Image: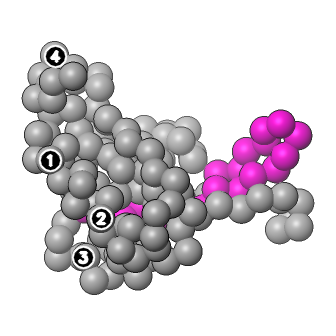
Amino acid sequence: MLEEDFELALKVIIVGNGNVGKSSMIQRFCKGVYTSEYKKTIGVDFLEKHLRTHQEEIRLMVWDTAGQEEFDAITKAYYRGAQLCILVFSTVDRPSFDAIDSWKNKVYAEVGEITTVLVQNKIDLIDEAVINT
């Protein structure tokens, strides 16, 4: 498809603590593949997904950001221009849930209040959950 074939292009950023499954989640969404091996994202990774909904062509530019604080200076620069934020925490990692407000504040400080979605990841491990309803 050509660039002009898309009616809408959205920059989506995925944020949250390290090891909550952000990379695995977007690999599955964008490429249809899953790996359970943990590989730390260094800085930022980028994937695209093309969708067709209600007769409209949409290009999602999905930016997977590192969850470790040591990469804050790098990743914050990639927040700019984002139109959608996905905040991710892990079912089996209470600190990742507790950090959600901090991640949201970092994003909003950089790009303002944008559409934001909260995702609980690793729900296949619900028997080991450390988050209550």
Residue receiving disc 2: 105
Q: In the figure, residue 6 lies in which quadrant? A: bottom right
Task: Give percent across and percent down for residue 59.
Answer: 71, 56
Between 61 and 112, which is closer to the camera in this rendering? Answer: 112
Q: CA distance from mark 2 to mark 4?
A: 31 Å
| Chain-order first, disc 1 or disc 4 | 1
Q: Are marks 3 and 4 in contact (CB under 8 Å)?
A: no
| Chain-order first, disc 2 or disc 4 | 2
Q: Main secondary structure of the magenta part?
A: strand
Q: Amino acid at mark 3?
A: Phe
| Chain-order first, disc 3 or disc 4 | 3
Task: Give percent across and percent down for residue 129.
Answer: 15, 25
Could you say which disc has been placed on residue 127 in the image?
A: 4
Q: Amino acid at mark 4?
A: Asp
Residue receiving disc 3: 71
Foreground mark, 2 or 4, reads 2
Q: Is residue 71 left or right of residue 93?
A: right
Task: Give percent across and percent down for residue 3.
Answer: 83, 68
Look at the image and tell me in which quarter the C terminus lies.
Answer: top left
The residue depicted at 50 percent of the width and 60 percent of the height is: 114
Q: Amino acid at mark 2?
A: Asn
Q: Amino acid at mark 1?
A: Asp
Foreground mark, 1 or 2, reads 2
- Which stretch appears magenta? 49-67
| Chain-order first, disc 1 or disc 3 | 3
Q: In the figure, residue 93 lies in which quadrant? A: top left
Residue receiving disc 1: 98
Q: CA distance from mark 1 to mark 2?
A: 13 Å
The residue depicted at 42 percent of the width and 38 percent of the height is: 34
Q: Secondary structure at mark 1?
A: helix
Task: Give percent across and percent down for residue 53.
Answer: 78, 38
